[in-house]
Amino acid sequence: MITTLAVFCSLALAQTSTSGLVCPVMPDHAVPAEAKAVEYRGIRVQFCCAGCEPKFAANPEKYISEAAAANKVVGQFLFDVTTGELLNMRRATFHHNYKGVRYSFSNQENFNKFKANPGQFVDNTPKKEALFCPVMKEAVASYGSASHFVDHNGVRYYMCCAGCVAPFRANPGNFIRNAASYVKEPKVIQPAPAQH
């Protein structure tokens, strides 16, 4: 009985990361799995049709806020927001919807930490970002091609690899000037092509 209950709970938590997502512009429309995607502030968003993408790109915050108010979910955050690490969505078995976005986690500890106080991790997201690794001094093509993000002094920096995270966290002052010209307001971008 206990084993059956544990399996049931695991299956309930392990909903697919994209199930139940809707188009942010036309929230009464589900998005097909093969729909074109864009990325915004680390969130992957898909649309019901080509005409919705430019509308979303013109004012993404409006559509995400409207979705949240209507209790709809329009995007998948690509990182474990508690650690800043890019997720392998096939291994992300814990999901929690918050303010129009689905946040996923690869372990229960991080999921529980987020679920206890999601605002702690989301509500103070920096208003500026740099899609540029300040440690290796190289551009990061898209959110989904970063390995991590690290927040510092009102800027979210995206790292090119896991090895850059510890040096940056230990002494960000040594690196932030490398990315100074890349610090910008977030905007909608196309995902980088998959690497094979």
Image (spheres, rainbow, N blue to C red):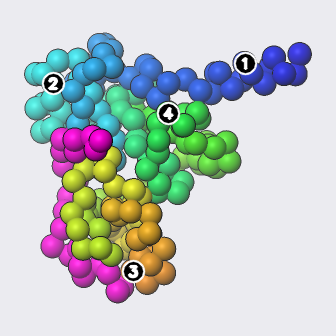
Are the residues flagged by discs 1 and 2 in contact, CB closer than 8 Å?
Answer: no
Mark 2 surroundings: few (<14), some (14-19) or many (≥20) residues within 10 A: some
Q: Amino acid at mark 4?
A: Arg
Which badge, 1 or 2, comes first in the chain's sequence?
A: 1
Are the residues flagged by discs 2 and 3 in contact, CB closer than 8 Å?
Answer: no
Q: Can residue 130 be spotted in the picture?
A: yes
Which dot marks residue 172?
A: 3
Which badge, 2 or 3, comes first in the chain's sequence?
A: 2
- Residue 62 horizontal/vertical position (percent): 24, 37
Asked if the magenta segment contains residue 175, the reply would be: yes
150 above or below 50? below
Q: Can residue 41 be spotted in the picture?
A: no
Residue that carries the numbered disc 2 in the rendered image: 52
Task: In the displayed orientation, state which residue is furthest to the right.
Answer: 1
- Residue 73 horizontal/vertical position (percent): 40, 27
Question: For numbered disc 3, what is the local secondary structure?
Answer: helix
Are the residues flagged by discs 4 and 1 in contact, CB closer than 8 Å?
Answer: no
Q: What whole-number distance in Å separates the C-alpha atoms at marks 2 and 3?
A: 39 Å
Q: Quadrant of residue 34?
A: top left
Q: What whole-number distance in Å separates the C-alpha atoms at marks 4 and 2?
A: 27 Å
Q: What whole-number distance in Å separates the C-alpha atoms at marks 1 and 3?
A: 44 Å
